[in-house]
Image (cartoon, rainbow, N blue to C red):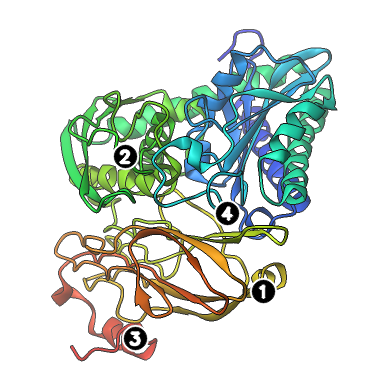
Amino acid sequence: MSERTALDPVELEILRNQLEGVAEEMGGTLIRGAYSPNIKERRDCSTALFDADGRMVAQAEHIPVHLGAMPAAVEAVLAEDPGPEDVYVLNDPFAGGTHLPDVTMVSPVTVEGEVLGYAVSRAHHADVGGSTPGSMPAGAREVYEEGLRLPPVPLVVDGEINPDVMGILLANVRNADERRADLRAQIAANDRADERLADLVADHGRATVAAAFDAVIDYSRERMTDAIAALPDGTYEAADVLEGDGVTDDEIPVRAAVTVDGDRIAVDFSGTADQVPGNVNAPLAVATSAVYFVVRCVTDPEIPPNEGCYDPVEVSVPEESLLNPDPPAAVVGGNVETSQRVTDVVLSAFAEAAPDRVPAAGQGTMNNLIIGARGADSFGYYETIGGGFGGRPAADGMDGVQVGMTNTLNTPVEALEAEYPLRVERYALRSDSGGDGAHRGGLGIERAVRVEVPASVSLLTERRRVGPPGLAGGADGAVGENLIDGEPVPAKTTRDVPAGAVVTVRTPGGGGHGDPTDRDPAARERDRADGKVTDEE
């Protein structure tokens, strides 16, 4: 902690909660101000505060894949030397971004004439251009096909929107009015950080707030190193595959070796596939973010998330690989699907080191469904669909939830049908989809959507061939399935459909945990009564 101002434990706890409150209030401002259902309903966005050196200090409890990758965006913007009233925008996966639909804004927070820190907002925009509505084409081979690519550029200069940058951005996307509104909501979220940090400085003094930045990072680091030190030393390995890249159906290996050494963790992805032609390549920041998420899960999730949590964790990834590709690799599926597989693999590696904290595999996919139309009446609907959470060492898995690197809500049926020419035909849990075990895996979901106009449909999904693995003797969860008008379609596909087509996504269930013969008979009766199983056992 900085020597300039010492904080007692009570003052530190007050300021830590206030800083986290600023990040949460930023998120609330963004959600309330956004126009697109993907942000205002599903809350596919994240906000955080960084100090003047670009270290994360506090984050809202939003999207793991957004948050763990944010430091790369701040680093990229700091290299541009932003002015005190500038707001930089970026989405370039090779310059601080994750995938093109995730648009990030970084702005200095200036208090009393000096930069105190940086406000960051990241939101998934329903369309950023590219070859298909929704900007997530399944067969993309280059990032250029996936949309407008923005390196860090100033969207706001000296407090005023830069019309040239805004004009270029809006000229290259569908639904420009919706994009403009969502971008303004992000600017407002960053402005809110300015206001609230100024309030904190007024209450506590600038030196105290700056010292709190150091103190909360130190506090998290100390708790994280203590938690890591409690794990048994050793190297733990695991591997899994992706089910093709949208160009071919060839399996793509993901391998991780996790080494616990005292109070540090090193994760090495040597042996993971080289970068592939299709769009499941994941930028290094995305892979790193998945590792950070798992480490927090297997240590103490209550440790305040900031730079201190991540200091004791080292991630090594070969260059030009699936998890560290060179441009112009296509990456839109890497952020959403490959990040899930990295999470599964690293959790599996930790199963031996922390068996009481690791569940069986969850659905392992975000089940990305994108429906959009071209032309004057264009629209873009994007959804990730929940599924089964894996059975846990002491409890069943949860049904129909987002797992791993996503943390969004669903789009309510009423909002979806009001905003788009779509109708929800079915939305229900899938009986018999959770893996059996002493503790069952959670159920997947079936969501069927009728498209009322000619449209383009893209699906980016996983776990359609092999179900999520059970753990400690538990059975695998059921595989997912994609259908258009009742006919199965590949896990990753883009195709045009006529008006009246019905797109059905059946999501995987979670794996079971523990020997099924150890399941409480009363629990089995509840399973039947609740409709979770329909088979005779």
Residue matched to label 4:
133
Read off the residue under disc 1: 417
Of callouts 3 and 1, which one flags the residue occurring earlier in the amino acid sequence? 1
Circles 3 and 2, Cβ within 8 Å, touching? The answer is no
Disc 3 marks which residue?
Answer: 526
**Which amino acid lies under the numbered mark 3 shown in the image of this protein?**
Arg
**Residue 50 in the image, given as x and y percentages of width and height:** 62, 25
- Residue at mark 3 to residue at mark 1: CA–CA distance: 34 Å
User: Which image quadrant for residue 332?
Assistant: top left
Decide: few, some or many residues near mark 3? Use Cα within 10 Å; few <14, some 14-19, many ≥20: few
Q: Which of marks 2 and 4 is nearer the N terminus?
A: 4
Q: Nearer the viewer, residue 1 or 285?
A: 285
Query: Disc 1 vs disc 2: which is toward the camera?
Result: 2
> Is label 2 in a helix, a strand or a loop?
loop
- Distance between the alpha carbons at the discs numbered 3 and 4: 44 Å
Other residues around mark 4 within 10 Å, as few (<14) / some (14–19) / many (≥20): many
Above or below, comparing residue 133 to residue 184 in the picture: below
Mark 4 to mark 1 CA distance (whole Å):
18 Å
Q: Which residue is drawn at 61% across and 49% down?
A: 127
Q: Where is residue 485 in the image (x, y as percent from the top left)?
A: 43, 79
Give the labeled residue for mark 2.
277
Q: In this view, does 420 lie to the left or right of 191?
A: left
Mark 3 or mark 1, whichever is nearer to me: 1
Residue ID at (71%, 62%): 377
Mark 1 and mark 4 in contact (Cβ < 8 Å)?
no
Q: Where on the picture, by quarter, is residue 229? A: top left
Of the image marks 3 and 4, the number of the one nearer the N terminus? 4
- Name the quarter where the C terminus is drawn: bottom left
Q: Where in the figure is residue 470, as x and y percent of width and height?
A: 21, 62
Pointer 2 with pointer 4, Cβ within 8 A: no
Task: Establish if 50 lies above or below 514.
Answer: above
